[in-house]
Image (cartoon, helix red, strand yellow):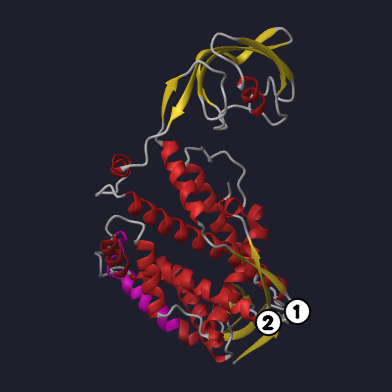
Amino acid sequence: MSSVETVSALERRLSASIPQQAIRGEVAARLKSIGRNAKISGFRPGKVPAKILEQHYGAQAHQEALGDALQRSFGEAVQLNNLKVAGYPRFELKTSDLGADQIEYSATFEVYPDIVLGDMAGETVERLVYELTQDDVDNTVATLRKQRATFEQVDRAAQKEDQVNIDFVGRLNGEVFKGGEAKGYPVKLGAGGMLPEFEAAMIGMKAGETKSFDMTFPDDYHGKDVAGKQVTFTITMNKVEAPKLPELDAAFCLSIGIEDGDVEKLKGEVRTNLQREVSRRLRARNKEAAMAVLLRVAQFGVPKAVVEMEAQDLMQQTMQEMQSRGMKVDNMPFSPELFTERAEKRAKLGLILAEMVRKHDLNAKPDQLKAMVEDYAQGFDQPEEVVRWYYADQSRLQDIANVVMEGNLVDWVMTQVKAVDKAISFDELMGN
């Protein structure tokens, strides 16, 4: 027999007992198994008497058998009481004499909550929309040309997008500071490689000119010696080069992979790729809005055990990402507690997603899955092989299915709330 006590909203305590007879049989079986290979002085393996085995390994066998019996008993009680256990139980033996006919114990654990969402009809969500234009296509083609520009020396003042070559000296309190001096230093104006005030000083200078100016470094500048301090720079302009864009012709198209050199085909591919990226970014932004609504109306708590597991995962992901960038994380003060807030949100959304997918049949349909795989594959040179690669492994296909499910959930949320379309600019959507 077993009983379940409610400790708190999500915590339960199970009380039950295990008959000693169920443990004794398991102990005997374990000792027999140990005896086949046990090495005890004076006996050959497999020939050790039962009493001797009991003396050497009885406590170990009994402890292991009791542990297995606790797990079995707990599992049966969970099934009998229809409990949805989150995390692992904490067992506590109530019987001090482990040789007693009945071993009483308790197990304290958390359960998954009932997923309850509040009224969503009163929620207003801005659904971002954007229609791709020909200007977007033309501007992207222009960017491709700029990326392949060559530079020619010119006899005029430097302006944005030029490439210049300079000598410079920076002084703090009259002394040249560390890293504050260079000769023949190349700078592409407008690329953001130098601080804005430094770049602004170069605009309008011609080759052979020298200029001095004062500049204050940002407080968070990586060079601690000059961070937040005013310095004096002297710049000498050595050379000014202007960009020369390649012609938009067959040769240019061939240089970026358009096999027949067709300009219109290039523009068509740019449009297709832009449309795919616009759709992807709109999905991501609208997903954020939909998930924020779900979190606002969610009326349930999340088991601590689930949050702790999510926090541990987030910590590991962060460490791996930093290591992949060449950073040393061994001595960094990482702790799962740093990720608790994010972990709770992610755990809550995970529970909501699973329940809404089940309740409203939001699973990825075969035609949706196929469409998304094929759309993704279009970004590769041999899309047919990419499609086959996904369908050859169920785990790869599941990653795509999860994206589709999330999209279905977003669509469902938009039918439950007051969705108001809001136009967004191309630059804002692309993060320019």
Which mark is on residue 122? 1
Q: Quadrant of residue 48?
A: bottom left
Q: Is residue 205 visible?
A: yes
Front residue of 286 and 314: 286
Q: Which residues are magenta?
A: 24-41
**Label 2 neighbour load within 10 Å: few <14, some 14-19, many 20+:** few
- Magenta-colored stretch includes residue 414: no
First in sequence, mark 2 or 1: give its number. 2
Front residue of 115 and 430: 430
Helix, strand or loop: magenta stretch: helix
Q: Quadrant of residue 381?
A: bottom left
- The residue at 53%/59% (across/down) is 281
- The residue identified by callout 2 is 116
What residue type is disc 1 on? Gly
Q: Is residue 107 visible?
A: no
Which mark is on residue 378? none
Q: Nearer the viewer, mark 2 or mark 1?
A: 1
343 versus 157 height, above or below? below
Q: CA distance from mark 2 to mark 1?
A: 16 Å
429 displayed left or right of 48: right
Front residue of 123 and 203: 203
- Magenta-colored stretch includes residue 40: yes
